[in-house]
Image (cartoon, helix red, strand yellow):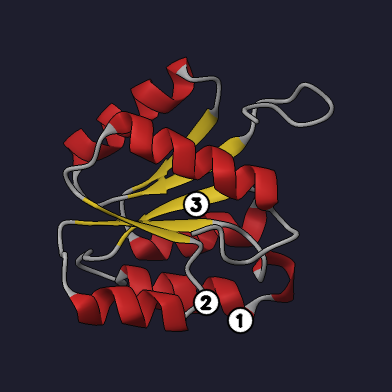
Amino acid sequence: MRRDENGRRRRLLVVDDQEEMRGTLSRMLWLEGFEVILAATGSRALELLGTAFFDLVLLDVHMPDVDGFTVLSKIRERPESFTLPVIMLTGADDRDSVLRSKQLGISDYLVKPYRVTDLLSRIDRCLDNAPKLLSCA
């Protein structure tokens, strides 16, 4: 569901330190009917999460200032964002990262490069299930 019950575009926060990735995701998601807010760092993402409402977060794992695991942990510590769907996007296809993400309460996990259709279906599934379920995977 790309719009909420009031017809408002669902608001996604895209967190990635790579400018090209942020731009690509932003354009693609906007064309798919989402409102997109961008953050280049984990610390900026935490600032935005403290001041604005989001329907879902797309979160890169490896960032130079505050990594995705720390951002996810902070999201899950806050009662107002405990059930916020978070999809980790990473170039690391290692078991430890997946396990750590699951332990921290990740909603879903995608390894780059991924197919756009896979990303969109996971976003839709998480939005359809939120806030009823923490795990959409």
Marker disc for residue 74? 2
Q: Quadrant of the N terminus?
A: top right
The residue where tag 3 is placed is 57
Q: Amino acid at mark 2?
A: Lys
Residue at 30% x, 73% y is 98
Q: Is residue 107 visible?
A: yes
Q: Residue 89's quadrant in the figure?
A: bottom left
Is 98 displayed left or right of 6 in the figure?
Answer: left
Characterize the local packing of mark 1: few (<14), some (14-19) or many (20 or more) Cα atoms within 10 angstroms.
Answer: few
Q: Which mark is residue 16?
A: none
Q: Which mark is residue 77?
A: 1
| Residue 127, position as x, y percentages in the image | 63, 44
Whether 13 is drawn above or below 34: the answer is below
The type of residue carrying mark 1 is Glu
Q: Is residue 55 visible?
A: no
- Helix, strand or loop at mark 1: helix
Choose between 82 and 119: the one closer to the eye.
119
- Residues at badges 1 and 3 in contact (C-beta under 8 Å)? no
Q: Which kind of residue does numbered mark 3 sit on?
A: Val
Q: CA–CA distance between discs 1 and 3?
A: 15 Å
